[in-house]
C-alpha cells in the first residue's frame, strides 16, 4: 500500500521550493475570464473560501453589464492608489443559503473612505480561494474600481490572522464589517488576533456570515506583503481544467500536484459551530487505490490528510478534493456521501514555509499536535 513520504522525520532537510509554471498575467478580467477564474479559485480554495457557483453567476452578470475589470500588478500601483482587502467571513455552509446583499461592498468601501479620507481605487481578495477570490471582480465592476492581481493567502484559510500581511508584520489599524441587512461595525483592535475574535463574534451575530474590509495597502506597503499574480494564476488553472479531456491530470500537472487517492466519499462528519464548518471526510480508494482509506480533516478548508495513522500532508500546504470526472473542486460544505473524488496535494507559497508563516498557519495553529514538514509531492495513486 503506497504511502506519502511528505511528512518524514523532523531532521529531514526540507525539499527545494517548487518553481511554479510560467505565468501569463492578465490586464483585465472580461466576461470570458469569469468561469475560468471561478474554477481556478475553487481549486485554490482547498475546500473553503465559499462555493463559487452563485458568485460565478453574479460576477459574470456584473462584468457583462459594466465591462471588463482592470487587473493591475503591484508594480503598477501609483501614489494615488488605495487598496482595500475584502472578503466574506464565516461558515461556507451558511453562505450557500444566505446570499450577500448587493450593497454590502459599496457600504464597506464608503465606510473605509470616510475613515481614511481618501478614495479607494483598488480592491484585493483577502484569499484567492473559493468565492472570496472571485467576488471582488464583481464588486469592482459595479463600483468602477480596479482589482489587484494578488491576494493575501495564495489559497484560502479560515482565520483573519492567517494572511500574508500579518506574516510581513503589517498592522491592521481597523476593520469594517457589514451584514446582509445593513448593520455596520468598525473595529479598532490591539492586534489582528483580537480582530479575528471580534470579527468572528460579529459574524456569528449576523447569522454565520458577513463581509469585511481590512488592511489598507498602497504602493509602498503592498510589495512583499501580498502574494502576487494569483488572479491570473487562478484563471490559467481554470482554463486548463475546463478545456481538458482528463481534467484531474491536467490540473495536477498545472499545479505540480500529487494525486493522493482516487476513490469515493464513504463518511462525512461535519458541523457548523462558532462561525466555522468543522469535521472530517473519509475517502475509500477505488481502482488502483482499492483497499485504501484516507481521512481529510477540515475547518472550512481541508487541513490534514491521514492514512493508517500517518499524516500524508498538512497545512499550510494545499489539499483539494475534486470531482474525479470533471476535475472541479468540491468545497467542504458540498461534499456528499458516494461522490467519486480525487484528493490533490501540492506545495504552498514559500511565504507560508517561513517560521512566521508556519507559526500562523501550520498544523499547531489549528490545534494539531504535530510539526509541519513540507510536502515533497511524492505521494501517488496506485500500488
Image (cartoon, rainbow, N blue to C red):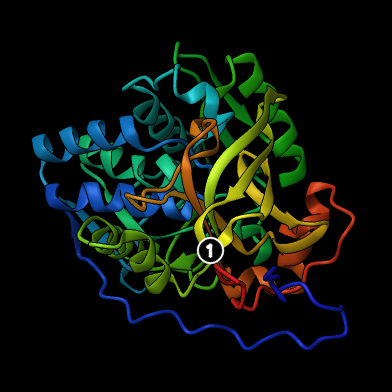
Q: Where is residue 183? Give x, y as percent.
A: 51, 14
The residue drawn where x is 32% and y is 29% is 54
Examine the rendered structure and indicate whether residue 184 appears above or below residue 309: above
As rendered, which of 85 and 79 lies closer to the eye?
A: 85
Q: Is residue 53 left or right of residue 329?
A: left
Quadrant of the image for the C terminus? bottom right
Q: Residue furthest top?
A: 181
Residue where numbered disc 1 is placed: 288
Tell me where residue 10 appears, x and y as whole percent: 87, 78
The one nearer the camera, 228 or 51, is 51
Specify whether residue 231 is in view: no
Q: Is residue 149 left or right of residue 348?
A: left
Q: Residue at x 82, y 86 (%)?
A: 12
Q: Secondary structure at mark 1?
A: helix
Question: Alpha-carbon neighbours of circle 1 within 10 Å: few (<14), some, or many (≥20)?
Answer: few
Q: Picture quarter containing residue 104?
A: top left
188 over 184 or under it: above or below = below
Residue found at x 62% / y 88%: 16
Give whichever of 137, 288 is nearer the camera: 288
Residue 70 placed where, x, y %? 20, 56
Report the residue at 46% width, 55% height from top: 44
Quadrant position of residue 21: bottom left
Q: Between residues 268 and 14, which one lies in front from this camera angle?
A: 268
Relative vertical location of residue 85 with respect to residue 353 in this rendering, above or below: above
Quadrant placement of the N terminus = bottom right
On the image, the x and y values in percent for residue 143 come to 24, 36
Amino acid at each position: 500500500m503506497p504511502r506519502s513520504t511528505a511528512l518524514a522525520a523532523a531532521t529531514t532537510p526540507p525539499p527545494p521550493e517548487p518553481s511554479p509554471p510560467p505565468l501569463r498575467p492578465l490586464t483585465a478580467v472580461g466576461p470570458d475570464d469569469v468561469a475560468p477564474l471561478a474554477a481556478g479559485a475553487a481549486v485554490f480554495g482547498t475546500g473553503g473560501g465559499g462555493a463559487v457557483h452563485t458568485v460565478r453567476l453574479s460576477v459574470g452578470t456584473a462584468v457583462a453589464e459594466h465591462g471588463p475589470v482592470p487587473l493591475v500588478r503591484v508594480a503598477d500601483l501609483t501614489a494615488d492608489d488605495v487598496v482595500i482587502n475584502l472578503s466574506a467571513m464565516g461558515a461556507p455552509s451558511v453562505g450557500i443559503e444566505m446570499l450577500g446583499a448587493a450593497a454590502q461592498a459599496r457600504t464597506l468601501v464608503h465606510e473605509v473612505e470616510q475613515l481614511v479620507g481618501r478614495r479607494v481605487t483598488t480592491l484585493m481578495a483577502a484569499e484567492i480561494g473559493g468565492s472570496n477570490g472571485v467576488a471582488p471582480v464583481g464588486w469592482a465592476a459595479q463600483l468602477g474600481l480596479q482589482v489587484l492581481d494578488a491576494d493575501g493567502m495564495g489559497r484560502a484559510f479560515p482565520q483573519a490572522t492567517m494572511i500574508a500581511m500579518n506574516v510581513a508584520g503589517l498592522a491592521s489599524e481597523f476593520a469594517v464589517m457589514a451584514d446582509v441587512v445593513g448593520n455596520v461595525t468598525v473595529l479598532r483592535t490591539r492586534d489582528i488576533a483580537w480582530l479575528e475574535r471580534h470579527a468572528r463574534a460579529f459574524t456569528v451575530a449576523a447569522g454565520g456570515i458577513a463581509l469585511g474590509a481590512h488592511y489598507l495597502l498602497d504602493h509602498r506597503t503592498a510589495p512583499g506583503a501580498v502574494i502576487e499574480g494569483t488572479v491570473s494564476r487562478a484563471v490559467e488553472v481554470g482554463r486548463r481544467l475546463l478545456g481538458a479531456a482528463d481534467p484531474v491530470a491536467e490540473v495536477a500537472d498545472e499545479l505540480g500536484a500529487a494525486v493522493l487517492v482516487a476513490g469515493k466519499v464513504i463518511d462525512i462528519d461535519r458541523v457548523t459551530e462558532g462561525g466555522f464548518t468543522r469535521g472530517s471526510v473519509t475517502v475509500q480508494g477505488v481502482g488502483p487505490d482499492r483497499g485504501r482509506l484516507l481521512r481529510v480533516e477540515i475547518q472550512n478548508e481541508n487541513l490534514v490528510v491521514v492514512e493508517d495513522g500517518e499524516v500524508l500532508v498538512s497545512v499550510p500546504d494545499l489539499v483539494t478534493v475534486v470531482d474525479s470526472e470533471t476535475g472541479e473542486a468540491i468545497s467542504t460544505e458540498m461534499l456528499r456521501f458516494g461522490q467519486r473524488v480525487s484528493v490533490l496535494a501540492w506545495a504552498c507559497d514559500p511565504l507560508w514555509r517561513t517560521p512566521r508563516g508556519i507559526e500562523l498557519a501550520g498544523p499547531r495553529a489549528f490545534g494539531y499536535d504535530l510539526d509541519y514538514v513540507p510536502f515533497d509531492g511524492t505521494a501517488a495513486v496506485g500500488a
